[in-house]
């Protein structure tokens, strides 16, 4: 996550939401610690906790979800019960069954 921020020339404060992997319990605690150390009280979304893995397409779904949140400026109440005013950048994490941990940053163009 830190490398993704660095490569994007961004600061942690630039990120509005993190979409987490949070279905893999081994990775969950490490990811949670990393998120908490990098970001100050940032909203977290975990679709995998609701629906599980998407058979290899979870990264794509996370990117799609982030894109729709930014486009509509609305987080579905299914994920977050409080309002977020402006969403410009979302960090999307993905942990696949092969052990790869990947971070994407989805951003509005304006």
Image (tube, rainbow, N blue to C red):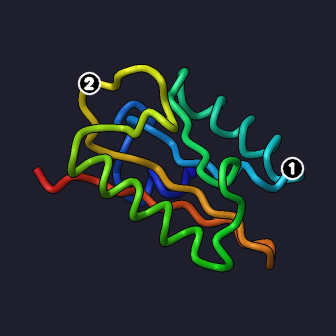
Residue at left 49%, top 30%? 80
- Against 106, residue 32 (above or below) is above
The one nearer the camera, 70 or 9, is 70
Q: Which residue is mark 1?
A: 25
Give the crowd class for mark 1: few <14, some 14-19, many >=20 residues within 10 Å: few
As drawn, which residue projects farthest toward the left? Answer: 110
Q: Nearer the viewer, residue 52 or 43?
A: 52
x%, y% of residue 55? 68, 78
Q: Position of residue 33 (x, y in %)?
A: 74, 35
Label 2 neighbour load within 10 Å: few <14, some 14-19, many 20+: few
> What is the CA distance from the residue labelled 1 to the residue labelled 2?
31 Å
Taking the spot 80% from the left edge, 72% from the top edge, the residue there is: 99
- In this rendering, the answer to whether 23 lies above or below 13 is below
Q: Which residue is mark 2?
A: 85
Residue at x 55% of width, y 36% of height: 44
Q: Position of residue 68 (x, y in %)?
A: 30, 55
Front one among 82 and 37: 82
What's the residue at 34%, 51% (across, down)? 9
Left-right relation of 80 to 99: left
Q: Which residue in the rendered view is the most extreme toward the right?
A: 26
Circles 1 and 2: CB atoms closer than 8 Å: no
Determine the secondary structure under disc 1: helix
The answer to which image quadrant residue 93 occupies is bottom right
Element type where label 2 sits in the image:
loop
Total numbered badges shown on the rendered structure: 2
First in sequence: mark 1 or mark 2?
1
Q: Position of residue 65 (x, y in %)?
A: 41, 56
**Label ID, residue 6:** none
């Amino acid at each position: 996550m830190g490398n993704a921020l660095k490569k994007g020339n961004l600061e942690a404060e630039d990120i509005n939401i993190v979409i987490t992997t949070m279905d893999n319990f081994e990775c969950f605690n490490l990811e949670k610690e990393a998120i908490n150390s990098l970001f100050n009280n940032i909203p977290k979304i975990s679709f995998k906790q609701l629906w599980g893995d998407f058979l290899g397409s979870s990264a794509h779904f996370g990117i799609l979800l982030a894109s729709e949140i930014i486009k509509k400026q609305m987080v579905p109440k299914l994920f977050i019960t409080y309002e977020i005013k402006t969403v410009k950048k979302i960090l999307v994490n993905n942990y696949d069954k092969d052990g790869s941990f990947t971070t994407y940053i989805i951003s509005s163009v304006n």
